[in-house]
Image (tube, rainbow, N blue to C red):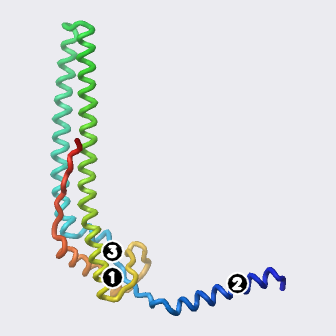
Amino acid sequence: MKPVLRVFLVLVLAMFNTTWASAQNMPTPSIAVMDIQSIVAGSAAAKSVRPQARKLRSDFQKDVRRQQDELRKAEKALAQQRAILSPEAFAKKRRDFETRARQAQRDVQARKQSLDSAYGAAMEQIRSSLIIVAQELAKERKVNIVLPKSVVFLSIKSLDLSKEALRRLDKKLPSVKVVVKEKK
């Protein structure tokens, strides 16, 4: 056997021996699974968020349509004034209109971001509460690994903590208020 191969073999055996010794001191893995997406989507809190988000989006869309109608009317009025205004006066009114239209577009984008952010914050509050519930369940059941069900190919039903986690999440967080912070 070549000296390099011997050294390699000795190192591998030494690593295996060290790993084996440290593995003997480790706790035995105790695993559970949770269907995180199903828990979050089916939670009472998420169900309370959905109608709020729908109403906010509906109000937003109505407001956008109203602004668009106002801009169309202003543009039509400007077009009618073209014949009676001097070129300089018309150009100034046109610039004012374009400035107003750009500002309306920025306002719409800012409001949409605020709505998206509010929805995301509400859902994050649900996920954060689920983490706390999962930690409590894991501690009670002496589980040291909780895996998302989406990454588990196969498991027995007794390892699934989803129903209990959902029950506790609903008790802990029955609803969430969607709070929109308007940007200034």
| CB contact under 8 Å: marks 1 and 2 | no
Q: Residue at x 28, y 36 (%)?
A: 106
Image side of residue 147 versus residue 12, left or right: left
SS class of the residue under badge 1?
A: loop
SS class of the residue under badge 3?
A: loop
Q: Which residue is mark 1?
A: 160
The image shows residue 27 at horizontal and vertical percentages of 45, 90
**Looking at the image, is mark 1 or mark 3 earlier in the sequence?**
3
Rendered view: 100 above or below 24: above
**Residue type at mark 2?**
Leu
SS class of the residue under badge 2?
A: helix
Q: CA distance from mark 1 to mark 3?
A: 8 Å
* Mark 1 Cα-neighbour bin, 10 Å: few <14, some 14–19, many ≥20: some
Residue 35's mark?
3
Q: Residue at x 32, y 68 (%)?
A: 37
**Residue type at mark 3?**
Asp
Q: Residue at x 27, y 20 (%)?
A: 95
Rendered view: 51 above or below 75: below
**Looking at the image, is mark 2 or mark 3 earlier in the sequence?**
2
